[in-house]
Amino acid sequence: MSIVGRIDRDITVGVITISDTRTKDTDKGGRQVMHHLEQLNTVLGESDYRIVKDDAGEITEAIQHMVDRGLDAIITTGGTGIARRDVTIEALRPLFDKEIEGFGEIFRMLSFTEDIGSRSILSRAVAGTVDRTVIFALPGSTGAVKLGMERLIVPELNHFVHELNK
């Protein structure tokens, strides 16, 4: 019996942490994303993990580099709040061919009911596609990364990639 939406090859994934303060040693969110990806048939190359500043140009450049390399998925952490320096969403939305509104809606619903209550309205988590790459933008907190990975991305990544490659 086959699983609907399952692909029969490794999925190539990039991870980008967006922060002015994190380093590879202190990036708990990025490491948590990679830990969750180990549950799937994914490949993360050495150059497919980056930390970039909260700068729209740097974010766009990192995303475009990974899209141009043909990665199936990119998962970002950080820069999704409402602080002046939080520009991840502003950098990503112009790149999207299609926005996946349901991702952010369900992420906020789960955050509200399972984790942080009404503070979830501050989250601007989003997902979309660029060419044949799906991009997920998660908040930088480890709780948000855990929620997004366990409840949304890990269960559906194969299906996303399958749909983009039909």
Image (cartoon, rainbow, N blue to C red):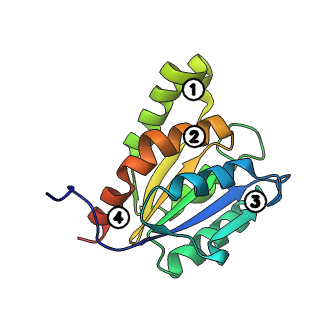
Q: CA distance from mark 2 to mark 4?
A: 21 Å
Q: Position of residue 39 (x, y in %)?
A: 47, 55
Contact (CB < 8 A) between labels 3 and 2?
Answer: no
Residue 26 got which mark?
A: none
Residue linked to disc 3:
55
Q: Residue at x 58, y 26 (%)?
A: 120
Q: Is residue 122 left or right of residue 4?
A: right
Circle 1 crowding by C-alpha within 10 Å: few under 14, some 14–19, many from 20 = few
Q: Quadrant of residue 23?
A: bottom right
Q: Residue at x 39, y 56 (%)?
A: 157
Circle 2 crowding by C-alpha within 10 Å: few under 14, some 14–19, many from 20 = some
Q: Position of residue 155 (x, y in %)?
A: 38, 47
Contact (CB < 8 A) between labels 4 and 1?
Answer: no
Disc 3 vs disc 2: which is toward the camera? 2
Residue 121 got which mark?
A: 1
Q: Position of residue 66 (x, y in %)?
A: 56, 74
Q: Secondary structure under badge 4?
A: helix
- Tell me the quadrant of the picture where the N terminus can be found: bottom left
Q: Is residue 64 left or right of residue 20?
A: left
Q: Is residue 20 left or right of residue 144?
A: right
Residue 146 got which mark?
A: 2
Mark 3 or 2, nearer chain start: 3
Mark 4 or 3, nearer chain start: 3
Disc 2 vs disc 1: which is toward the camera? 2
Q: Residue furthest bottom?
A: 69
Residue linked to disc 4:
161
Disc 4 vs disc 3: which is toward the camera? 4
Question: Mark 4: which amino acid?
Answer: Val
Contact (CB < 8 A) between labels 4 and 3?
Answer: no
Q: Secondary structure under badge 2?
A: helix
- Tell me the quadrant of the picture where the C terminus can be found: bottom left
